[in-house]
């Protein structure tokens, strides 16, 4: 499995909108081959504007093919519209994982 990590700086007053728009991104990602999970995390400061996403994919090929999906990028653009900046996306190999079933 492969994880992609991205850091965001959310525009002042846009945290709730960012989270709401992320729901459409999650829906788009859920339709992509190899998608496993998306974690959207807020920074340590409860009132802060820093966030991080970690998406997990079945393989590097699945991650790479997601980059060609128009629906995914349309949803991502709506989320990014709420941001001042985002860091370059970093790819990491998942050595171990355990996700509880709901």
Image (cartoon, grey):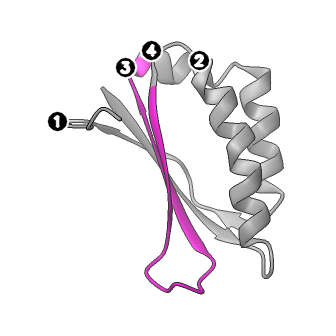
- Mark toward the viewer: 1 or 2: 2
Residue for badge 4: 61
Main SS of the magenta part reads: strand
* Residue at screen point 51% across, 60% down: 52
Q: Real-space Cα distance between discs 1 and 3?
A: 12 Å
Say the numbered circle drawn on residue 95: 1
Secondary structure under the numbered disc 4 in the rendered image: helix
Q: Residue 55 magenta-drawn?
A: yes
CB under 8 Å between discs 2 and 4? no
Residue for badge 2: 32
- In the rendered structure, which disc, 2 or 3, sits on the residue that comes first in sequence? 2
- Mark toward the viewer: 2 or 4: 2
* Quadrant housing residue 3: top left
Q: Which residues are magenta?
A: 36-60
Q: Real-space Cα distance between discs 4 and 1?
A: 17 Å
Residue for badge 3: 58
């Amino acid at each position: 499995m492969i994880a992609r990590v991205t850091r965001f700086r959310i525009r002042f007053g846009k945290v709730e909108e960012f989270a709401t728009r992320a729901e459409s991104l999650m829906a788009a990602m859920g339709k992509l081959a190899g998608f496993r999970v998306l974690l959207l995390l807020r920074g340590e400061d409860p009132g802060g504007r820093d966030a991080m996403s970690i998406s997990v994919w079945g393989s590097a090929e699945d991650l790479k093919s997601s980059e060609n999906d128009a629906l995914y990028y349309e949803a991502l653009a709506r989320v990014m519209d709420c941001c001042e900046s985002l860091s370059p996306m970093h790819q990491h190999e998942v050595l171990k994982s355990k996700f509880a079933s709901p």
